[in-house]
Image: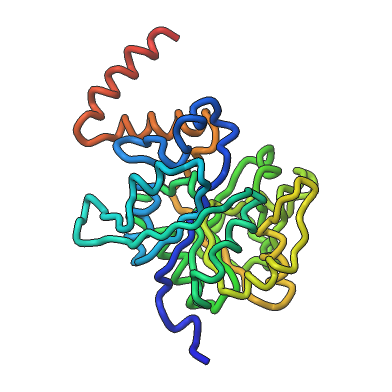
Amino acid sequence: MSNPYSNQITRAVIPAAGFGTRLRPLSNAIPKEMLPIGRKPVIAHILDELIGADIREVLIIVSDRKPQIRAYLGDEYFDEATDDKKIACHYIIQQEQHGLGDAILHAEEWVNDKPFVVAFGDCIIESPYPSGPMRRMVETFADKQCGAAVICEAVSWEKVSRYGVLSQEIKLSEYPDEPFAVADIVEKPAREAAPSNLVVAARYAFSTKIFDLLHKSGRDVRGELNVTDSVSALCRQGNPLWAVPLQKGEARRDIGNYESFFTAFIQAALKDPEFGASARKAAEETLKEF
């Protein structure tokens, strides 16, 4: 049997079938993955990130309510900044939405028994080095022969109940600069029960061992299949879980609600190389009214 860690990960899965409830009524007309952040929709930013990490194929999990995604991307997407690089786009329909774990199970046959990346379809990762966090995660996955690896970030303690929260093998006294081993992951704990304020930042790398555990995992009270439960089971079986922290100048931009969507769009507009100055001037004039 070949060593699953001997080759670069070349396939990614993007779950993009969710309802976008927190962005209604806008998401009734436009999938949240197609909302503009600067000059590109969210999903184009994600594909550029994957291309920069040498991912060659992506499976996008969509619903039949979102034909715009395939119409925009087609069967092959090019990074406009470097049009010599491209990524093949595949699609599968998720008829009913039952959580992230259920979406990932739709990719089981497609990944073909090889490690793969999962990138949340409503989150972009900003970095001064294109695809830097993704590359570090993939490299850590291979170096540590992981069952799973994640990108992580620190959030305020008031927000830990929104995320999958990491419990470090060795307690860290401050925010880490380097990848670290994780003992467990807890889904949306109450603040007083959270093992840390370090949370999964919308990116995973998985061995295909995750599928067997997803099949065995039960659904939560909302009827959803949480991937964190299966990742926790991976840890208990002795499969290493490692976390790769976002560094200074890097950030996760969640486009799942109006607050984060507005913030991400404004930041992109202000930084635009051609029209950023005009946007900054307009912002300054508008702020005088408050």
Residue drawn at (67%, 53%) of the image: 165
Colour setting: rainbow
- Residue furthest out toward the top: 289
Left/right placement of residue 257 relative to residue 225 reads left
Count of number-bearing discs:
0
**Residue 252 in the image: above or below residue 256:** below
Q: Position of residue 162 (x, y in %)?
A: 66, 43
**Residue 8 in the image: above or below residue 158:** below
Q: Position of residue 116 (x, y in %)?
A: 49, 69
Left/right placement of residue 161 relative to residue 263 reads right
Left/right placement of residue 257 relative to residue 197 reads left
Q: Is residue 22 visible?
A: yes
Residue drawn at (71%, 51%) of the image: 224
Residue drawn at (54%, 61%) of the image: 204
Q: Is residue 55 visible?
A: no
**Residue 55 in the image: above or below residue 146:** above
Seen from the viewer's position, the closer of residues 189 and 80 is 80
Q: Position of residue 267 (x, y in %)?
A: 37, 33
Q: Position of residue 120 (x, y in %)?
A: 51, 51
Task: Place residue 139 in its image quadrant.
Answer: bottom left
Seen from the viewer's position, the closer of residues 43 and 182 is 43
Seen from the viewer's position, the closer of residues 12 and 153 is 12
Task: State which quarter of the image contains the C terminus.
Answer: top left
Left/right placement of residue 176 relative to residue 279 reads right
Residue drawn at (39%, 14%) of the image: 287
